[in-house]
Image (cartoon, rainbow, N blue to C red):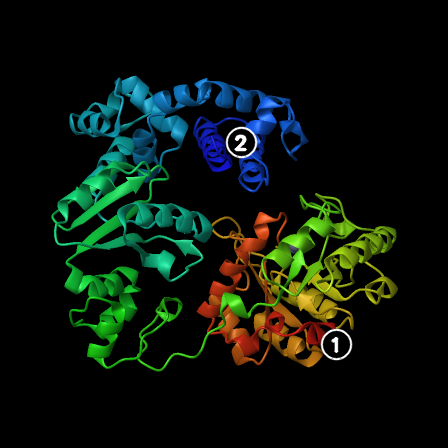
């Protein structure tokens, strides 16, 4: 069993524990262990056999026991049992109907049904009202939802990283291309689509229905099918004739408004052919949010990025050391990496005091010695206190190469105070970048009331850059806000805010978000050489 297979099983276990409403800390521990194992440089199966697996970070006695069982028997018995009991297709249908996993299972148990199909039949036969807690109103709502099952519905989307992983795996298995919101790199993906090309569509539709990611089929036709995942998210499959693949991919990619403005679409075997026949220059999918027929700008690319300016280490809430993070960044082909751990006001996790900052300097110096010519920069993610002061004294900030200023607590502040608070921080001469300016968590916490126009004006005056934070649940600034910032003449920084080695690979999400804001390489500070990063304001 290789590391990826082991990690997959632990992740499946975490997912099912979550469905069965287990303690969220347990679920998270399994997810973290899976991530550690996925990126472990050694074969984990051997570590388990040698009794040394607890040397890996985040693997305690409980998880070690599961791993031993998995390596010895090829399976985790409790996982297999959960898979039988939880009937993922039932849970998927339940999610689709707006029911929690626990509630779907209660209803199923009380109806004596075991899968989604039986649940539909029982509902159609009027048995739902026999379920404790289901009155006529709830029954009517569920029946109505079931009747609309094959229509697209408004529902919170999937985070981009999860959607990319899910759809990418399916597209690969079907030898097709991921389309829909994923191909346009939307921060929250509602429309998931895969487009394939073949003369004979039947085997592809069959393979689609049999994919492990698909738990129930909502619709099935000759060259089109809609399935639903365990998260209750519909996935569309289009199987085009090869000579029309480009047309189907363009339509499948969207957005609806963008495509509608190009209709009628000519047939083409790839997108270039379709665009050529339309007489319109090819458009990167990230820019297809609104009708556009012009010559697109040359957008920033991942390869233009020369360094990452925001990451954490063991000094605060990161999971790797300064040197490990530096080495990983070097292996990604970067020239520099800024270590930006938290300051004490962040609260929930450990923050660096002035003393810690100076002790960390020694570790950074040692890392620089072993990684030269790669440069590890002394940075900080300094909290902006409620009154706009920074959480470290100026003489400490003055020692650093790179200072990020961040609002963490108090995101609900009213418009005027919030804007004043951030403006005050940007006036500090050592601050180089404002982190995650709008403070949102996608689908969980709305944006703060910060007046961005005012922030753009101050950032321009003070030559402070604005971050495009690459954490999948942040992506902040958003594409739309990047576009406004660039129009105001402000520079952005594409950062990962990585808390682990693997987190550094989220740069692709930050860059895609900047692209959605029409950013070129010249607009992005960390596409510049180190000297420009180190030049004082
Ligand atoms: Zn932060
Ligand atoms: Zn951070």
Question: Which class describes the residues within 10 Å of circle 2: few (<14), some (14-19), or many (20+)?
Answer: many
Q: Is mark 2 within 8 Å of ligand 2?
A: no
Residue under pointer 2: 27
- Where is residue 70? Give x, y as percent: 49, 23
The numbered dot on residue 535 is: 1
Report the front residue among 51 and 430.
51
Left or right: 122 in relation to 47: left
Q: Nearer the viewer, residue 258 or 182?
A: 182
Report if residue 408 is visible in the image: no
Q: Secondary structure at mark 2?
A: helix
Which of these two is toward me, 113 or 84?
84
Residue located at (19% from left, 40% from top): 206
Q: Determine the residue positioned at 16% across, 64% down.
A: 244
Q: CA distance from mark 1 to mark 2?
A: 45 Å
**In the picture, which quadrant includes the C terminus?**
bottom right
The earlier-in-sequence mark between 1 and 2 is 2
| Residue density around tag 1, few if under 14, some if 14–19, many if 20 or more, within 10 Å | few
Seen in the image, is 465 located left or right of residue 130?
right
In this rendering, which labeled residue sits more in front, label 1 or label 2? 1
Give the answer, above or below, for where 41 lies relative to 127: below
Whether residue 85 is visible to the viewer of this picture, yes or no, is: yes
Mark 1 residue element: loop
Residue 479, image x, y percentages = 48, 66
Quadrant housing residue 123: top left
For ligand 2, which image quadrant applies?
bottom right
Image position of 164 (left or right of 60): left
Q: Is residue 392 left or right of residue 201?
A: right
Q: In the figure, residue 267 lies in which quadrant?
A: bottom left
Q: Percent position (x, y) of residue 423?
A: 69, 70
456 over 405 or under it: above or below: below
Whether 518 is drawn above or below 51: the answer is below
């Amino acid at each position: 069993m290789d590391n990826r297979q082991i990690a997959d099983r632990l992740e499946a276990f975490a997912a099912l524990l979550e469905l069965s409403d287990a303690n969220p800390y347990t679920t998270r521990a399994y997810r973290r262990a899976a991530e550690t194992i996925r990126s472990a440089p050694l074969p984990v199966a051997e570590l388990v056999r040698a009794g040394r697996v607890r040397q890996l970070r985040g693997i305690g006695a409980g998880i070690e026991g599961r791993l031993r069982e998995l390596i010895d028997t090829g399976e985790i018995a409790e996982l297999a049992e959960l898979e039988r009991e939880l009937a993922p297709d039932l849970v998927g249908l339940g999610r689709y109907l707006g029911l929690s996993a626990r509630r779907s299972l209660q209803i199923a148990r009380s109806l004596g049904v075991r899968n989604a199909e039986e649940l539909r039949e029982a509902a159609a036969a009027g048995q739902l009202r026999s379920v404790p807690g289901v009155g006529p109103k709830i029954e009517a709502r569920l029946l109505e939802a079931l009747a609309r099952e094959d229509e697209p519905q408004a529902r919170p989307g999937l985070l981009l990283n999860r959607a990319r992983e899910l759809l990418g795996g399916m597209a690969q298995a079907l030898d097709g291309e991921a389309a829909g919101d994923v191909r346009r790199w939307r921060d929250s993906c509602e429309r998931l689509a895969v487009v394939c090309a073949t003369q004979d569509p039947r085997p592809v539709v069959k393979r689609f229905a049999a994919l492990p990611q698909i738990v129930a089929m909502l619709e099935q036709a000759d060259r089109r099918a809609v399935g639903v995942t365990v998260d209750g998210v519909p996935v569309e499959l289009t199987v085009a004739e090869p000579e029309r693949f480009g047309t189907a991919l363009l339509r499948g990619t969207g957005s609806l408004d963008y495509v509608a403005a190009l209709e009628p679409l000519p047939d083409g075997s790839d997108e270039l052919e379709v665009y050529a026949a339309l007489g319109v220059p090819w458009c990167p999918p990230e820019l297809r949010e609104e009708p556009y027929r012009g010559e697109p700008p040359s957008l920033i690319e991942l390869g233009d990025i020369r360094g990452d300016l925001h990451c954490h280490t063991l000094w605060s809430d990161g999971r790797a050391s300064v040197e490990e993070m530096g080495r990983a960044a070097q292996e990604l082909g970067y020239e520099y990496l800024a270590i930006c751990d938290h300051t004490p006001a962040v609260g929930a996790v450990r923050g660096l005091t002035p003393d810690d900052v100076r002790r960390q300097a020694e570790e950074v110096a040692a890392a620089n010695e072993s990684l030269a010519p790669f440069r590890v920069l002394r940075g900080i993610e300094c909290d902006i206190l409620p009154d706009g002061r920074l959480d470290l004294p100026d003489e400490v900030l003055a020692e650093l190469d790179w200072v990020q200023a961040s609002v963490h607590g108090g995101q609900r502040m009213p418009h005027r105070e919030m804007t004043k608070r951030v403006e005050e921080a940007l006036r500090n001469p050592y601050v180089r970048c404002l982190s995650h300016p709008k403070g949102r968590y996608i689908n969980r916490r709305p944006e703060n009331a910060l007046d961005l126009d005012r922030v753009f004006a101050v950032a321009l005056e003070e030559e402070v850059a604005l971050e495009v934070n690459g954490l999948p649940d942040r992506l902040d600034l958003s594409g739309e806000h990047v576009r406004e910032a660039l129009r105001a003449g402000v520079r952005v920084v594409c950062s990962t805010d990585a808390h682990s080695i693997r987190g550094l690979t989220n740069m692709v999400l930050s860059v895609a978000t900047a692209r959605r804001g029409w950013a070129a390489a010249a607009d992005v500070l960390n596409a510049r050489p180190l000297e420009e990063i180190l030049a004082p304001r």
